[in-house]
Amino acid sequence: MKPGLSVERFDAITGRYPSLRVALLGDFCLDRYFDIDPRRSETSIETGLPVHNITGVRCLPGAAGTILNNLVALGVGTIRCLGLRGDDGEGFELQRALAARRGVDLAGFVAVPGRHTFTYTKPLLHRPGVPPEELSRLDLKNFTPTPDSAQSAVVAAMDRVAADPDGADAWMVMDQVDLAETGVVTAAVRARLGRLAADRPTLPIVADSRRSLEGWPAAHWKMNAAELARLAGRPLGDLASVVAAARSTAQRLGRPVFVTMAEQGMIGASADGAVAHAPAHPVVGPIDIVGAGDSVSANLTAALAAGADLPEAMQLAMAAAHCVIHQLGTTGTASVAELRSRIFPG
């Protein structure tokens, strides 16, 4: 990897963030936190079971919404949300949470009658002097295919952004659902994404999938080492094998590939075979890794849109991940000021 970012390059890249337009396509969910005070616990008279009294409820955008939170924290000027929600109470809360964020455009965010809004409900026990303890999560998902009409609405929203000369400086695509074809990034949506990538070969399109990127169109693929191993069809037991697999994948796609490796940092490979390594920052104290991958996705997208090269974008992304993992009991974000303090300490 080339020498680290200079202060001048950091300022030049992050200084462009307020003028950026990012299209954020994928599965937006509602992160609903229940804050529980165990000192107020009771026993149900009717069942004899414990009663957890909720003293606070926080509704935040999750999944693709976590990437949005990070883009907002970076000061990105316009974020065009392309996705789906249910026509239900959770959908109302998600719409309200998204609309409250600065710079968010919800023209492509569609309510679908008869569908659940993807929701993660996270009960948190708060005890004095210790980090919050997350209890068993309660998920609300869809287990039937996304209706054709909803898929068509997403594709139409993509068409509008693609046709707009000022539509987007970069795209970020997040496929979060466990069951294929039940979320936003269906085969029809991926096909439209492939046409966009073919038409705009230099446009940054960062793609991440909870299941696998196998069969996806060419884009800036972002994954972890285990996901890369499954794509490669072989174990990747050391750094050299990860580098080789990332390089061959990038050359096959004709676009960059990013591979996160927890405490070993991140590998980036470009279509011309060049490879860079961004080391992870040392961990200090307790950590919570929830949201770290999303912060990496957001920072890669923003930095590439602002003209950063691969090593620069990776260095910014690893600084963001370090900020986020030290934010306990929440899905964190990193601001430009926080990135600066990590990259240029003291």
Image (cartoon, rainbow, N blue to C red):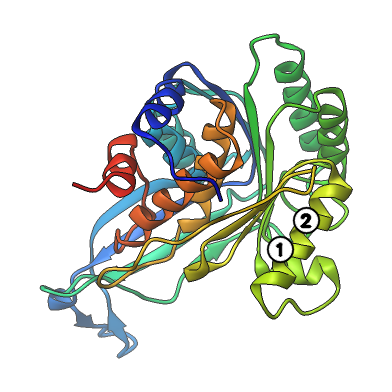
Q: Is residue 62 left or right of residue 310?
A: left
Q: Residue furthest front?
A: 3
Three-letter code for the amino acid on which mark 2 is drawn = Arg
Residue at point 52%, 68% (across, down): 264
- Any part of residue 280 in sight: yes
| Label 2 sits on residue | 247
Q: Is residue 21 left or right of residue 82?
A: left
Which image quadrant is residue 69 in?
top left
Q: Do tag 1 and tag 2 residues touch (Cβ < 8 Å)?
A: yes
Which image quadrant is residue 220 in?
top right
Q: Give the Cα separation between the discs numbered 1 and 2.
A: 6 Å
Residue at point 75%, 53% (across, down): 182
Rendering coords of residue 140 (x, y %): 57, 60
| Label 1 sits on residue | 243
Vertical side of 159 occupied by 116: above or below: below
Q: What element carries label 1?
A: helix
| The one of 147 and 340 positioned closer to us in this rendering | 340
Residue at point 64%, 28% (across, down): 170
Rendering coords of residue 281 (x, y %): 38, 61
